[in-house]
Amino acid sequence: MLTGTVPAKFLFIHAKLFGHDAPDSFSLIPLAEILSEILGAGPATKKVTQQYERIINHFGTELSLLMEADSDEIEACLPMLGEAVARMRNGNVTRRPGSDGEYGVITLFSPQELETSNLRKRLKNYEKGEFH
């Protein structure tokens, strides 16, 4: 709950909208960045953009997907995306800090997880536009 010098009116509105036990903020990773990691392509590539559009068409908005959608339903639409969203929501991410003018990197999966998963096989149906 928000505390400190926050105006009482704001505290009331925050509690009314989000409940008394709601966290003050959320750390989210943009969907394009999550897809980029899973698909092994840059966030602005055609492959990622196509998958992004399919997912948004299915779930509505990016925010509703990242904050509210059931991870099993997400997983049914794109292998590993449900797990990625669950990890992001729980803060189970790997943070590699940047230095000397390089940005830091946040990842959801280790390289080994991406290599050993049967992701490529599971993606074939999804790339055809077939949702489970």
Image (cartoon, helix red, strand yellow):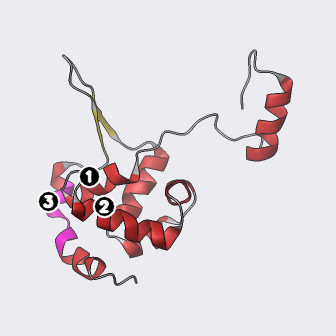
The disc placed on residue 44 is 1
Magenta stretch: give its range: 113-120
Figure quadrant of residue 6: top right
- Does 123 lie within the magenta span? no
- Amino acid type of disc 2? Thr
Q: Specify the label residue 49 is tagged with.
A: 2
Residue 123 x, y percent position in the rendering: 24, 74
Mark toward the viewer: 3 or 2: 2
Is the residue under label 1 in contact with that under label 3 (CB below 8 Å)? no
Is residue 56 found left or right of 23 in the rendered image? left
- Residue at image location 42% in from the left, 68% down from the top: 55
Q: Which residue is mark 3?
A: 115
Looking at the image, which residue is at 76% across and 37% down? 14
Using the rendered view, name the quadrant where residue 47 is placed: bottom left
Image quadrant occupied by the N terminus: top right
Q: Nearer the observer, disc 3 or disc 1?
A: 1
